[in-house]
Image: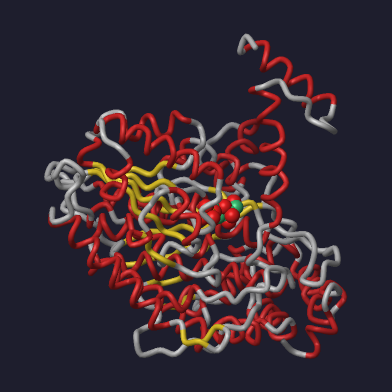
Amino acid sequence: MSEMNAEGRSRLDQTPEWNALAKHREELGEVHLRKLFADDSSRAERYALSVGDLYVDYSKHLVTDETLRLLRELAAATGVAGLRDAMFRGEKINTTEGRAVLHTALRAPESAVVESDGVNVIPAVHAVLMKMQVFADRVRSGGWKGHTGKPIKNVVNIGIGGSDLGPAMAYEALRAYTARDMTFRFVSNVDGADLHEAVRDLDPAETLFVIASKTFTTIETITNATSARNWLLTGLRAGEEAVAKHFVALSTNEEKVAEFGIDTANMFEFWDWVGGRYSYDSAIGLSLMLAIGPDHFREMLAGFHLVDEHFRCAPPEENVPLLLGLLGIWYGNFHDAQSHAVLPYSHYLSKFAAYLQQLDMESNGKSVDRDGNPVNWQTGPVVWGTPGTNGQHAYYQLIHQGTKLIPADLIGFAKPVDDLLPGLVGQHDLLMANLFAQGQALAFGKTPEEVAAEGVPQDLIPHKTFKGNHPTTTILANELTPSVLGQLVALYEHKVFVQGAVWNIDSFDQWGVELGKVLAKRVEPALTAGDEVPGLDASTAALVARYRSLRGR
Ligand code: F6P
């Protein structure tokens, strides 16, 4: 990290680069995208970048060349490139946990050398990949038999957070590539209904449980895994010996896996330098590999790697994750935007925003800097979204005509992924027409004059006016392939990195999830056994009492 950054820590909002941006923001005022486009006929062409298969149009942003220059200066002054290089080198940039941050090593080629604590991690990464591949091939080909000798037809992934959202999202995204003769389910919630619905129509003799937990101590996962084991053994009328054929573990914690009763030969390992929300291309992706097969999984990893290399090597002017990160800073810190919408025009990306919520909000939802000082600036946004066109008939009204500024990403593909139903009536063109129309409507709106020219009565003109000037990035690719999915996810990972680096926060810890976990453990005996919970506040105590009485306790 540069001297300047070390010095400037926790005073980000007093640096010359920050002040220059604040001043520039004032000067720009409410300049309209209509004017920015009118003034520059080459804007659409100039404000677009490509990385791999992704074409990224950022012309519909409230920025000028000067804005972009000043944002890049902020990135330079806050040492983004230095921290990026330190991450790729395996330095312990997750300072509050004393860990390296090396998810990029998970998708590096076998020839790469990436060291953590002086040890090259690449051979171990590829050994686990190969172990996953051999296992996936055996299961998919019917070679792996369950306790009664039947092949596996159903895979149930049990995990939560990063041990669920990544594989579940990618499974949906790549459905067209999955083994359609197998059933895949993802269970995360400690609400027993989740597991119940996932297994109720499955034959235990044909079911494999993949227990995914980095720590192997997460209460939701261990509880669901225990219930799943009961369901399996009861269904098979078998003893513990059946577990080995129906349970595998994905974890960093061999001891806890063994304690649970899973044969550690059936454990797929990863390492503490893989953050939970950055883990689905580690062993945590086993369920996904079982679904799409090892070759597609490796294609996905290559997509990740392509964007890693771009992020590491591309100059600032062409660096897409850097640009997207800085645009988010422009809106969050200089326009008071509170949220960021991710709007994929692909039904297969139905879980993409939910996945990004953990990636972004668990990474950058922080209010102290790396040294523990309170930050005076907004950090991570609320990330949300659902696939187009559904959102258009729900909340787009607020984006178009509400009072909030909501920058959005519109993501679309030139070709539909699969041989979809033969009877589809040009639906993909209609889908994409909606994406392009929304980008246009959000940016340029409709003036009162245009509304009046349509003969709209005077009193309705304000209601039918669209102010426009709502910024969007459009990400367009040819097709949603495994590689393109990897590229997209890596793009967002590095965007989140850039923002955390500028804000000088630790994007790789997650202390904010701890308190609730501890309190839940404390409250549970009060619900079940009526134990006194020391220090329980009056509101929670009353709720606990009411709950107990409703349960007849
Ligand atoms: O929610 C906190 C968290 O630690 C996440 O960061 C993580 O992805 C999730 O819990 C699951 O953790 P584990 O994989 O250890 O079960």
- Number of numbered tags placed on the structure image: 0
The image shows residue 113 at horizontal and vertical percentages of 44, 90
Left or right of 32 on screen, residue 350: left
Identity of the residue drawn at 79% across and 23% down: 541
Q: Is residue 444 visible?
A: no
- Image quarter for ligand 1 equals bottom right
Which of these two is toward me, 521 or 274?
A: 521
Q: Is residue 379 above or below residue 343?
A: below
**Quadrant of the drawing holding the N terminus:** bottom right
**Quadrant of the drawing holding the C terminus:** top right
Q: Is residue 286 above or below residue 85?
A: above
Which of these two is toward me, 276 or 217?
A: 217
Q: Is residue 16 above or below residue 478?
A: below
The image shows residue 259 at horizontal and vertical percentages of 47, 51
Q: Is residue 535 visible?
A: yes
Which of these two is toward me, 137 or 222?
A: 222
Identity of the residue drawn at 57% across and 74% down: 101
Where on the picture, by quarter, is residue 363?
bottom right
The image shows residue 543 at horizontal and vertical percentages of 73, 21
Identity of the residue drawn at 46% across and 57% down: 410
Q: Is residue 4 above or below residue 469?
A: below
The image shows residue 197 at horizontal and vertical percentages of 36, 30
Left or right of 463 on screen, residue 289: left
How was this image coloured?
secondary structure
Identity of the residue drawn at 83% across and 32% down: 534
